Image: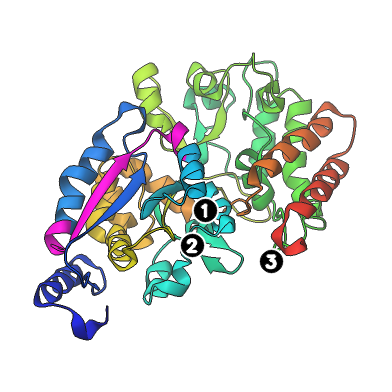
Amino acid sequence: MTRSRITAVGLMAAAALTVTGCTAADAPSDGPVTITFWGSYGNGGNSTQQDALNELLIPAFEAEHPDIHVEYVDIPYDSLLQKLTTSAAGEELPDLVRADLGWVPQFAELGVLVPLSQEMEDFDELADATYPGVLATNLYEGEYYGLPLDTNTRVMVSNQAALDAAGLSAPPATFDELRSLGDAVKGTGTFAFAENKLQAWNIMPWIWSAGGDIADPDLTTSTGYLDSDESVAGIQLLVDLYVQDAVPNLIIGNEGATATSDGLPGGQYATILDGPWMRGVWSGQYPDFDPVYSTVPAGDGGSVSVVGGEDIVLTQSSENKEAAMEFIRFTQSEQFQIEMVKTGQMTVIPEFAAQQNEIEPFYATFATQLETAKNRLAIPDASKVDAILQEELLPAFEGTISVKEALANAAAAIDPLLPGAK
């Protein structure tokens, strides 16, 4: 529908959107329509976010858009990917999906998502308002297939009592300070740092902070990047700490080791990397634990972490794409973003970070980290990359090959998975 055909009601809605920070609406031309929206806001029985969506945000959107009805369907996270896969095969996808950011390239490759960078006239304006690292989760083969909806990242979380015992008044801020912590905890029964696995979510903050990367920007090769001297420096730090018994064997997959969620508050681990969701876990299980949050220790590449979160995508199955895109615009508004902040979600828009931090000061460190945080490989075979990293880096920690050789082996296995290499 063109702007010249916008009804009087549509004009009123467009005016209201301007107030809430959205662009003008293209209201549906053939009377009221219903758009369906699948997500996992209520996952785990926590109704706070789902209630905010159903009781506040969707009614607010519908009041501004009386010709658009939004039907939200909550699906447990563990079931959502399978349901999306099945529905894609049957061409029965909803209009909109709140998708884990790792799923976007997978469904983009299947051709079931609308490239918003082609179809939304104001996409660039909306995209430019978001964190670059979070926006990048929607990029696949030169087009953006969604917009960020909510986000998170990993920062260093410390046990101050463990740091005090090691003679440190503050968390390590650099690679060198983390090495010093490793020396300081010798013989104390405390590990300087703990990590769960060797997958991209776990190791990329160290590679990026050392100045390395997993592939070139055009995703044509991993060789030459993952095995660069900078990338080697990031992994070498972890291997050195592991060898001197300052990192537990949890990092190489010992399932019998104490989990980071228990080892940090228990004082076995002085530091870990983790996300904002852990505060709620610890407040219930370890009410006396007071975690200390700081940015990832900086190397030659700065302090760089990894982004997580969800994107909102529009499917090719939608028969009401204009109406669905109007709801996408609403999700980028101050009203939507800040209401979700109140439920525990982090905003994807830096302009709202100060307001977010006033509501919940705890988020300040995460917001700072998001300014430099990066996305993992946005490719359909991302899960295979994780398996490769876990398998190929293990020998370096066991001391049977060098870090350089392990990363070269991993890079060679990742190369054929990159879309630019095909």
From this view, report whether residue 17 is shown above or below residue 241: below
Q: Quadrant of residue 333?
A: bottom left
Badge 1 amino acid: Val
Q: Is residue 136 magenta?
A: no
The image quadrant where one finds the N terminus is: bottom left
Which contiguous range is marked in magenta?
A: 62-80
Tell me if mark 2 has few (under 14), some (14-19) or many (20+) residues whose alpha carbon lies within 10 angstroms of its own.
many
Q: Are marks 1 and 2 in contact (CB under 8 Å)?
A: yes
Q: Is residue 66 left or right of residue 192?
A: left
Q: Which residue is mark 3?
A: 218
Q: Earlier in the sequence, mark 2 or mark 3?
A: 2
Numbered mark located on residue 145 in the image: 2
Amino acid under label 3? Asp
Q: Residue at x 31, y 27 (%)?
A: 45
Membership of 71 in magenta stretch = yes
Horizontal side, residue 420 vs residue 45: left or right: right
Q: Earlier in the sequence, mark 1 or mark 2?
A: 1
Q: Is residue 105 above or below residue 21?
A: above
The percent coordinates of residue 353 (x first, y second) are 34, 55
Q: Amino acid at mark 2?
A: Tyr
Residue visible at 15% across and 55% down in the picture = 60
Q: Secondary structure at mark 2?
A: loop
Q: Which residue is mark 1?
A: 104
